[in-house]
Amino acid sequence: MEFPAADKTERTPRADEYSVALEISRSDLVRTFLEKRVFSPNYLTGKESADRPVVCPFTEEEVPNGWNMRFVVRPHNSFGVAGRPIATPWEYRLWGKTDKEARSEFAKAHPRR
């Protein structure tokens, strides 16, 4: 997973690290399934470069099949203070399947009433 580095402003310091949470949901249940912390490339190099994306690796084995899921990213400054999060849209995905195959399996698993 890649995402853009957070912008530094006059009111907010640069992000030194990020927490990347994988959230899963089914019906009304929403849970943080897995969370990883990654350093900003800007922190490691000491240079400000907004064009370098931040990379957080998730393997197929770590992501559960058959759930609605999204990724939520929060920047953290050097004191551990979290900034405003960004999130991907909720998506149903079966790893190793095409989008058409995943939609078909989702329709079978969640029939309309």
Image (spheres, helix red, strand yellow):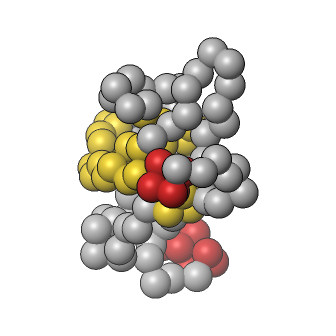
Q: In the drawing, does residue 28 fall left or right of residue 34?
A: right
Figure check: 20 above or below 64: above
Q: In the drawing, does residue 40 fall left or right of residue 58?
A: right
Q: Which residue is drawn at 51% across and 57% down?
A: 45
Which residue appears farthest toward the top when viewing the image?
11
Q: Which residue is drawn at 50% across and 63% down?
A: 55
Q: Residue at x 38, y 53 (%)?
A: 38
Residue 44 in percent (x, y) is at 45, 55
Residue 98 in percent (x, y) is at 58, 82
Q: Quick one: 73 or 40, which is closer to the camera?
A: 40
Q: How many marks?
A: 0
Q: In the drawing, does residue 49 fall left or right of residue 97?
A: right
Residue 104 in percent (x, y) is at 56, 73
Which residue appears farthest toward the right when viewing the image?
51
Which residue appears farthest toward the front when viewing the image?
46
Q: Which residue is drawn at 30% across and 42% down?
A: 32
Q: Can residue 106 be seen in this view?
A: no
Residue 96 in percent (x, y) is at 46, 84
Q: Quick one: 24 or 1, which is closer to the camera?
A: 1
Figure check: 47 above or below 9: below
Q: Can residue 77 be seen in this view?
A: yes
Q: Quick one: 44 or 107, which is closer to the camera?
A: 44
